């Protein structure tokens, strides 16, 4: 019986360690989200599931700037936006998506990919 109790204790410690690690990860992502929001007059977000790769947190600042972060799990991404205290949208559409402001870099990059415009760095 001692070995069974030992296994249960180990599993409980492992779960506690994993919980603490996940919470630290969420705190790191929340800090980055908060920094983005502070730099852009506030921010709103959307969490998109990426399958085994995790989840993408798309951020749109009050000034129209945008950015994204990729978290290793959807749960971590959800916890991070919750900790950051931003408004989270169910989808990336409508008024939320319309706030995104793109600059010359994005337009050049999109043109290069879509219609034979200038090549992106690293393309042969």
Image (cartoon, rainbow, N blue to C red):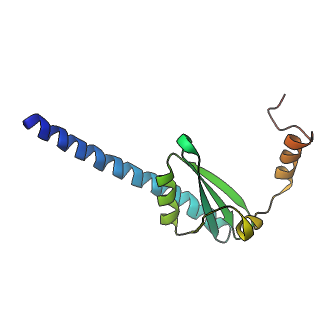
Q: Where is residue 74 in the image (x, y as percent from the top left)?
A: 51, 52
- Residue 63 can be seen in this image: no
Q: Where is residue 40 in the image (x, y as percent from the top left)?
A: 68, 67
- Residue 20, relative to residue 5: is it above or below? below
Residue that extends furthest to the left in the rendered view of this protein: 1
- Residue 91 can be seen in this image: yes
Q: Is residue 77 left or right of residue 102?
A: left
Q: Quadrant of the N terminus?
A: top left
Q: Position of residue 119 (x, y in %)?
A: 87, 37
Pick whichever, 98 or 32, lies toward us: 98
The structure residue drawn at horizontal position 64% and vertical position 68%, both measured from the top left corner, is 43
Q: Position of residue 80 (x, y in %)?
A: 50, 59
- Residue 105, relative to residue 11: is it above or below? below
The structure residue drawn at horizontal position 29% and vertical position 47%, both measured from the top left corner, is 15
The structure residue drawn at horizontal position 82% and vertical position 51%, both measured from the top left corner, is 106
- Residue 69, relative to residue 88: is it above or below? above
The structure residue drawn at horizontal position 38% and vertical position 49%, both measured from the top left corner, is 21
């Amino acid at each position: 019986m001692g070995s069974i109790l030992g296994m249960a204790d180990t599993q409980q410690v492992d779960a506690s360690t994993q919980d603490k690690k996940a919470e630290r990860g969420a705190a790191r992502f929340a800090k980055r989200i908060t920094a983005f929001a502070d730099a852009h007059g506030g921010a709103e977000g959307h969490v998109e599931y990426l399958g085994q790769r995790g989840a993408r947190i798309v951020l749109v600042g009050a000034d129209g700037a945008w950015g994204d972060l990729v978290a290793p799990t959807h749960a971590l991404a959800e916890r991070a936006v919750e900790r950051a205290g931003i408004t989270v949208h169910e989808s990336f559409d409508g008024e939320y998506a319309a706030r995104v402001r793109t600059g010359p870099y994005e337009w050049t990059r999109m043109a290069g990919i879509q219609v034979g415009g200038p090549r992106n760095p690293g393309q042969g």
